Image (cartoon, rainbow, N blue to C red):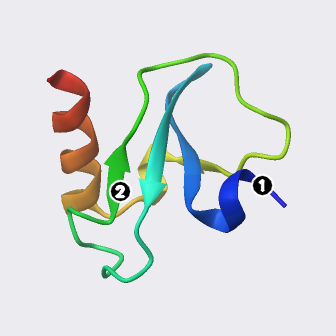
Amino acid sequence: MGLKKGKYAYVEIAPGSFVKVRVIRSKADDSPRKYQVVARVTSRVPAEARIVKLDSIPEPARKAILEQLAH
């Protein structure tokens, strides 16, 4: 099943480092508001979690994720 039916995913920001994000399906894929960080960086990910590479996310959304981590 995996983390509330696809509402959440883990983004791999570095090898072995992940951040949990809320995926808002109603937003466009390149929208900066598509991914909202909900937890700090972790190395442990649930087995059923969907993992997304940071490089596979469009540039505006990637910048928004990194900005949210900086705050």
Query: In what quadrant of the picture does the C terminus appear?
Result: top left
CA gap, disc 1 and disc 2 = 17 Å
Q: Residues within 10 Å of mark 1 (few under 14, many from 20)?
A: few
Q: Is 1 on the left-hand or right-hand side of 43?
A: right
What is the quadrant of residue 39 in the picture?
top left
Q: Amino acid at mark 1?
A: Gly
**Residue nearest the viewer, comparing 45 with 17:** 45
Q: Is residue 58 above or below residue 14?
A: below
Q: Amino acid at mark 2?
A: Tyr
Q: Is residue 65 above or below residue 30?
A: above
- Which percent across, then down, holds residue 56? 47, 58
Q: Give the residue displayed 26% in from the left and 58% down from the top.
A: 61
Q: Is residue 34 above or below residue 62?
A: below
Q: Earlier in the sequence, mark 1 or mark 2?
A: 1
Q: Is residue 54 above or below residue 40?
A: below
- Which percent across, then down, holds residue 24? 40, 69
What is the quadrant of residue 32 in the picture?
bottom left
Q: What is the total number of numbered labels drawn onto the structure image? A: 2
Q: Is 11 on the left-hand or right-hand side of 35?
A: right
Q: Which mark is residue 2?
A: 1
- Residues at discs 1 and 2 in contact (Cβ within 8 Å): no
Q: Secondary structure at mark 2?
A: strand
Q: Is 56 on the left-hand or right-hand side of 16?
A: left
Q: Is 30 on the left-hand or right-hand side of 12?
A: left
Find disc 2 in the rendering and name its residue.
Answer: 35
Q: Give the residue displayed 44% in from the left and 77% down from the top.
A: 25
Query: In what quadrant of the picture does the N terminus appear?
Result: bottom right
